[in-house]
Amino acid sequence: MKYILSILLISFALNASAELTHEEENVVIAELNNYCADSWCESAIEFNFKEIKCSDSTATCDLYFTTQNNSTQDQPVFVQMCEVKPFTRFEQMVVDQAVFESGAITAATLKDGFVDQVDRCAEKFFH
């Protein structure tokens, strides 16, 4: 019985670890939007990253964002989603992080490999 309980607890811990906390998700989204302002988002297409949801079972994160063509006024906004893999954990997405005394994560530097996958995703929308 102890053996089964131990396996269940380990399995639960492994599954739970893939989900980003709300705080981690906010940091990744904020840093993607900061990166976007300095990179490929300088094009006529404006990207606004909204949400990232990760799953260990698929070894992917679904990245939700909006795009809008700013070449002329009154262009529609499109809701988009890309699968980014094999990144599912916060530490796989960031190099380092700034933490205030309160323990809250305030900023992070995104890892190149993660940014490369987001770049590949974004390139699909440059039509």
Image: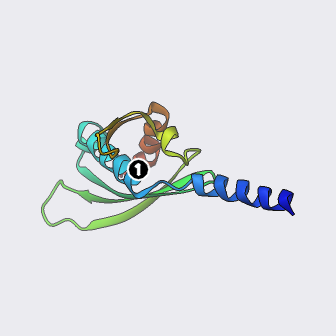
Q: Is residue 54 above or below residue 109?
A: below
Residue at numbered disc 1: 24
Question: Along the horizontal axis of the image, is 75 left or right of 1?
Answer: left
Q: Residues within 10 Å of mark 1 (few under 14, many from 20)?
A: many
Q: In this view of the protein, can residue 126 be seen by the observer?
A: no
Q: Is residue 115 above or below residue 50?
A: above
Give the residue furthest to the left.
Answer: 73
What's the residue type where badge 1 is placed? Answer: Glu
Q: Position of residue 29 (x, y in %)?
A: 35, 51
Q: Is residue 35 above or below residue 58?
A: above
Q: Position of residue 86 (x, y in %)?
A: 59, 44
The foreground one among 74 and 8 is: 8
Q: In this view of the protein, can residue 91 be seen by the observer?
A: yes
Give the residue furthest to the front.
Answer: 2
Q: Position of residue 104 (x, y in %)?
A: 33, 46
Quadrant (top left/top right/bottom left/bottom right) for the N terminus = bottom right
Picture quadrant of residue 2: bottom right
